[in-house]
Amino acid sequence: MKKVRLFLVMSILTLVVFSSCEKTEQLSLDTQAILGTYKGTLTPETGLKSTNDGSFDGTMDVTDAGNGQIEVHCYGGDIDTTFMLDYYPNGDSTMVCLTGDAFEQMYGHMKENMNNGGMMGSSDMMGGQSWTDHMNSEHQEGDEHFGGFDMTNMTFDYTMQTGNGDIRFQGKKTE
């Protein structure tokens, strides 16, 4: 009987150890997949239909800032700006959301479940969470989001709010 118990305990521990390692490796691969340089177009979002939409070449360099955040450096034309975004796995996409003061200004409240040490649950990954959990715990119905990564096509689509109107970036990963 002791041998059966010992065998069961060892089997369960082995399963837990392999599951934990697999989860960490998967997150690392997802994080690395979104990092890099994206080249594409920057388009002013005026809401007006026109044959000349005012698009110009743009680049976004995406680097890891740790704790489920990325730093995005966008440049092209007269634009040269850097900002932080939280990122969340969502099937074949990686969604992004504003962070810190930008989140509070946009949505009128601070995040309750911060990526850097928030509540732990089955979907938490190294302090982060899934897109569904983020939407359920941090947002109200109708909250707007501004883009994300298409992991299948290796593209990034994001709309930046500026004092002079919105500017949309659409680009493909080059590096």
Image (cartoon, grey):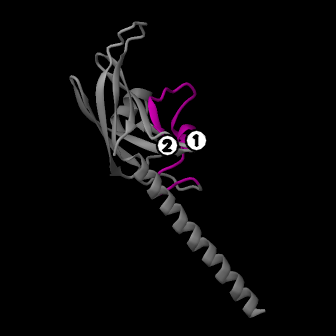
Q: How crowded is mark 2: few (under 14 residues within 10 Å), some or many (20 or more)?
A: some
Taking the spot 41% from the left edge, 30% from the top edge, the residue there is: 158
Mark number for residue 132? 1
Above-or-below relation of 124 to 160: below
Above-or-below relation of 96 to 44: below
2 vs 1, front mark? 2
Q: Residues within 10 Å of mark 1 (few under 14, many from 20)?
A: few
Residue extending farthest to the right is 1
The residue indicated by pointer 2 is 151
Residue type at mark 2 is: Met
Above-or-below relation of 165 to 119: above
Taking the spot 38% from the left edge, 32% from the top edge, the residue there is: 171
Question: Residue 31: x percent and y percent?
Answer: 42, 51
Quote the CA–CA distance across marks 2 and 1: 17 Å
Question: Residue 114: x percent and y percent?
Answer: 44, 46
Above-or-below relation of 48 to 67: above
Taking the spot 35% from the left edge, 9% from the top edge, the residue there is: 52
Magenta segment: 123-151
Q: In this view, does 34 lie to the left or right of 74?
A: right
In the image, 101 versus 15, the foreground residue is 15
State whether residue 148 appears in this view. Answer: yes
Q: In which quarter of the image is the N terminus?
A: bottom right
Question: Residue 121: x percent and y percent?
Answer: 57, 55
Number of numbered discs on residues = 2
Mark number for residue 144? none
Residue type at mark 1 is: Thr
* Membership of 131 in magenta stretch: yes
- Name the secondary structure under disc 2: loop
In the image, 174 versus 69, the foreground residue is 174
- Name the secondary structure under disc 1: helix
